[in-house]
Image: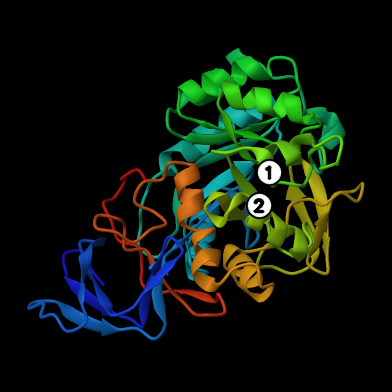
Amino acid sequence: MREGRPLRLAAEGVVSGGRRRRGLDLLVRDGRIEGWVPRGAATPGYAVLAVEGDLAPGLVDIHVHGGFGVAAETMDADALVSWRRRLWQRGVAAFVASLPSLAPEEVRERIGRLAPWVGRREAGLATLLGLHLEGPYLSPARRGAHAPDRLRPPDEREMLDWVDAHPGTVRMVTLAPELAGAREVARALAERGVVVALGHTDADADAVEAAFAWGARHATHLWNAMSPLGHRAPGAVGAFLAARGTTVELICDGHHLDPRVVALTVRLVGPHRVALVTDAMAAAGQGDGDYPLGGRTVRVQGGVARAPDGALAGSTLVLDEAVGNVVAWGVAAAPWAHAMASVVPARVVGAEGYGTVRPGTWADLVVLDGQGRVRPLMEPIGEEGSRG
């Protein structure tokens, strides 16, 4: 497919937003969905491409530290291109690159290094939507694999120095709301349209609910690295399960969460509020071995990444595998499993034009089958340098 060439895509069905429709063909022009027509309608001038399987929008991963040997915190331009290519080959159309807790000067340098690539659309490459700062304002008690010497109290001036230096680059920040200074940081971020996510927190339910009033609305990998659900102490997990209008991440690799917990969460909050994420590090798509993460060496054995102290250190998951797992576990049928990895995460970070099929959205399409298997259909084509 090339820009300017009108194309009619005839598939078995069209999946978007958890719904599957049959009997419709998609019309694509200039890299965007132009609309759809009934199967028998005439469309002179359109080349017809028959597709085996269902058409669906490309996947969107909003929490991923690396993959295929590439780490977001250390990569150069060539490594970024390689990572983007490998993601697209697995059906991921767009992603938010996550940085672990780093020293202040490192955070500023990484933001500046990656800012020119945000929103750049290129053929055969996943689009970098922006950055996610997973730290350094995290609880030492729930730090997971984050290096303890990189954690520190929230500092509004420091955070705004990072965010305002390259407006629109930082899409999401994870922090622990119980820390002194968290309220000021959260409010300042929310005013700028940055997603305030709560995670790596030992806060009780009351403190988490207070943070909702500051503008927090998203849970970083719910259940993992946060105060747990108890029948008398609901913790951060309970606060999110009981809240309305918030969204939650789930890492569905079979190691971070038991499939029954995944099913329970989706049933309680609804699939429209669940974003499947990978929290993947450089070993995703690779083999066992030693890999960098947040200034530490992470060892991967049997596909499980652990820090030197034994804590889980992200995952080796790729997002298409998460979709397949959710279907295989019986949590959701393929259309909704796909929605949790496309339209929901795109909505969380405000990525207009991604994750859904409607007139005007990008034609970054994949082919989806009933088992949740995903493969790309075509290269993403759009305006050079346009921001998602």
Q: Is residue 33 left or right of residue 4?
A: right
- Residue indicated by mark 1: 241
Residue 273, position as x, y percentages in the image: 55, 49
10 Å neighbourhood of mark 1: few (<14), some, or many (≥20)? some
Q: Residue at x 67, y 27 (%)?
A: 209
The answer to whether residue 280 of the structure is visible from this angle is: no
Residue 220 to residue 83: above or below: above
Quarter where residue 283 is shown:
bottom right
Observer-nearest residue: 342 or 114? 342
- Residue indicated by mark 2: 268
Q: Residue at x 55, y 36 (%)?
A: 172
Q: Residue at x 29, y 59 (%)?
A: 358
Q: Earlier in the sequence, mark 1 or mark 2?
A: 1
Residue 180, position as x, y percentages in the image: 74, 15
Q: Is residue 291 left or right of residue 245?
A: right
Mark 2: secondary structure: helix
Observer-nearest residue: 50 or 64? 50
Residue 55 to residue 279: above or below: below
Observer-nearest residue: 328 or 265? 265
Q: Residue at x 76, y 47 (%)?
A: 223
Quarter of the figure that contains the N terminus: bottom left
Q: Residue furthest right?
A: 309
10 Å neighbourhood of mark 2: few (<14), some, or many (≥20)? few
Q: Gap between marks 1 and 2, in whole Å?
A: 7 Å
Residue 59 to residue 269: above or below: below
Mark 1: secondary structure: helix
Q: Amino acid at mark 2?
A: Leu
Quarter of the figure that contains the C terminus: top left
CB atoms of marks 1 and 2 within 8 Å:
yes
Q: Amino acid at mark 1?
A: Leu
